[in-house]
Image: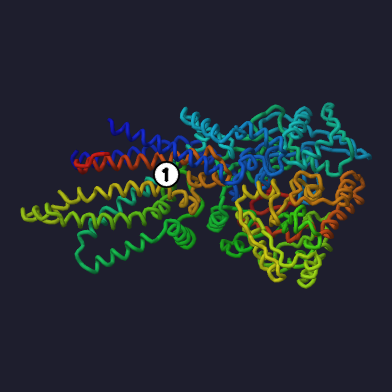
Amino acid sequence: MNKKSLAALLTAFVLAGSLGTVCLGATTETEASRDGDVASSGDTGITIGLPQDLDSSLDPYQITAAGTREVMFNVFEGLVKPDKDGNFMDAVASSHEISDDGLTYTFTLRDGVKFHNGETVTADDVLYSFKTCADTTVNSSVASALSDIAGEKADGNTVTITLKEPLSSFLSAVSSVSIVPADYTDQASAPVGTGPYRFVSRSVQDNAAFERNDDYYGKLPQIKTVTCKIFEDNNALFTALNAGALDMAFHLTVDQTKNLTNGYKVTEGEMNLVQALYLNNAKAPFDDEKVRQALCYGIDVDSILELTEDGYGAKLGSSMYPSFKKYFDDSLTDAYPYDPEKAQQLLADAGAQGLSFTIKVPGNYTQHVDTATVIAEQLSQIGVTANIEQVDWETWLSDVYQNRDFDATVIGFDAAYLSPDALLQRWMSDDATNMIGYSNPDYDAVMKKAQSTTDDKEQTELYRQAEKILSDTAANVYIQDLADFVALSPKFTGYTPYPLYALDFSTLKLA
Amino acid sequence: MKVLLRKILNLMIALLIVTLLTFLALQVIPGDPVTKMLGADATAAQAAQLRTRLGLDQPVLVRYGRWLLSFLKGDPGISYSYSMPVAEMLKGKLSVTVILTALSFAMTVFISIPLGILTARAESVRVNHFFLIMDQLFMALPPFFIGILSVYLFGIVLKLFVPGAYIPLSESVTGGLGYLLLPALAMALPRSAMTVKMLRSSIRSQMAEDYVRTARSRGLTDGQILRRHALRGAMVPVVTFLAQSAAEIMTGTIIIEQVFTIPGLGRLFLSSIGSRDFPVVQAIVVMMAVFIILVNFAADLINMAIDPRIRVS
């Protein structure tokens, strides 16, 4: 072969390679571009950055990640839905009534509510939704609330649900039962709900597109299209935000907001998480209440807030965060003032001087790793050695959460639905998600009573009592509800924070 | 023909070993795809049901065998974490990564070959030193570092591009290629520096050969000798090295795609390992392995064409 044919061969190689890929690129990306066109030709569009990809399944009953739930909040609605103050307002139902004994719930369906596929919502769809949700949901608290249903019946456009026993959090469970069209089986990839936005498309690890539901029964949102850009790396998200590629971003850290130089408006809020040093109550040394209390005294929460969050964030004191205004007990935040001597005394009483244990913490959550680091440093002052072991998220889930093979961990729990049960029920001794193996008959009794009481005032009191028990027995070392920052381009206004994971697109509008 | 058959057989064996190792590696690390799919609070019954549906309740070797069979039939399976066919998921990502690799490889070739020849012929000590220093510098810079620097410099300070706003080629060919330019360059620079060094020393050793002296005595200039004879010989080790570079660039996209937030195979690969999404990991590993083996095979063929004495063994 001479030089010329060699050159020809080489060129052919390169050309064949690049042509092939260009064609491939063109054919496979067409769908995405069509969606892109919809997004750019609409009246108003907004681009929002998400710090992680949406769940594999967008079926409302299969959603596991809070980050997916907060986006799909715009697509799905229950008979009732939470508003920004944590109250329940009627959604697919136009009114609801609860009988005095707390056993019968009557919902009247709103006239002419349409699914995103154009069909009208019927009572059959509602019954189907309740049944499917009860059978398949991966949200254990919703499943347990729905198992209390004794009977459901539909009569015209009225749906009546009777319970076996009164359950105070039932309405929150109702709000979690997204109303979906009966016998529609493509929810996982092409979700259909009744919310103010309909799902248009998604591209794995790249974007998800939503469009205003022009048939929406309520007030029509101003923004026509919402494009969520997915960044699995928080730094990349921040870079894109600061460069103006995004109109809005959530869950920013203090450091990021300080480095933001593009003039975006930053709103401070809380993440609605209970971050704590969770202790394995079922295992020595933390089966001893004294040792747990010693750690509470030996950890300076104020200085953790100062060091990890620049003083932002909110102290907790128990398994409840401040956005749940009604149930949050401020006095518990100072139940264990920083007192290293008392801590050492308690350790001596328990015969646990020179205590050494391991904190397993998921390395992908910087905020938890930071907190663990400060805790370990503080504990070394009282002669306690805390070794930090960073694990990846999957390992954390299987080792810590499921197999309960750990001494201590730093993590945050959020409320999967708007009820104190979502945060408190898991510490009942027989609860399957009681990761720390907390077992306290008093706590169980108070919680059972709270869940079955219909009197609102009494119930609130009981939940607060339950929180106090957690604090008194030092179930965990409660740290903080982390600060959460939202940045919004000056082109837009109307960001509305919720007391649970929800990013409401519908209140956004042009400034 | 025999050579080709032997090559294909080798490819098969290599793939079998690579996939088995990947498979075993994913069994050894803790974590469970089912937890990822159902969330932490699913009941044991739900988990068991899904496990059966995915075939995860079978012994390891049975699962590997099943995967291998369906893969050989052309079906790489369904992604655990995205519940969609792996083939469909990879299509869009593959083109991005292949274009990025091709772009970066083309840059490497077009930068290093002229520069290699130029520096080989440079006689001034100063110029030589300058090239040597530049060479060392660029060889020492890892692509991700060049990447981070250029995101900062061109993206944030000079605002020449918007970091994180990758434009699909189907929307705008110039915009898409423009976005890929910097990441391609970040990978090409260190590889080019290495290739330049290699080509220079290869040319110099050729120019010291006896046949060159003979050619000089026939009155040919060094330039003529280089073009007509020496370059051809000097290219043999360089082609092999370039094949290696193509493979390195392909695997390098895993990191550079993170740095520039490009929705390609590399990012998918990393996150799939994180979520223990075995079918996706396996499919990407196979593609990378095939690419590496094919590139090396192509290098062998080219070398045979350059130097007829070389026979593929």
Above or below, comparing residue A80 to residue A348 in the picture: above
**Residue shown at the point (48%, 61%) measured from the top left:** B152
> How many numbered discs?
1
Determine the image quadrant of residue A14. Answer: top left
Element marked by disc 1: helix
Considering depth in this image, is B156 or A70 the residue closer to the camera? A70
**With A431 as the anchor, is A58 left or right in this view?**
left
Q: Which residue is mark 1?
A: B173
Extreme residue in the right direction = A100
Q: The C terminus of chain B appears in which quarter of the rendering?
A: top left
Residue A159 sits above or below residue B101 on the image: above
In the shown orientation, is residue A305 left or right of residue B21? Answer: right
The image position of residue A141, as x and y in percent, is: 77, 42
Q: Residue at x 79, y 61 (%)?
A: A317
Location of residue A175 in the rendering, given as x and y in whole percent from the top left corner: 78, 41
A465 sits left or right of B252 in the view: right
Hey, what amino acid is under mark 1?
Answer: Val
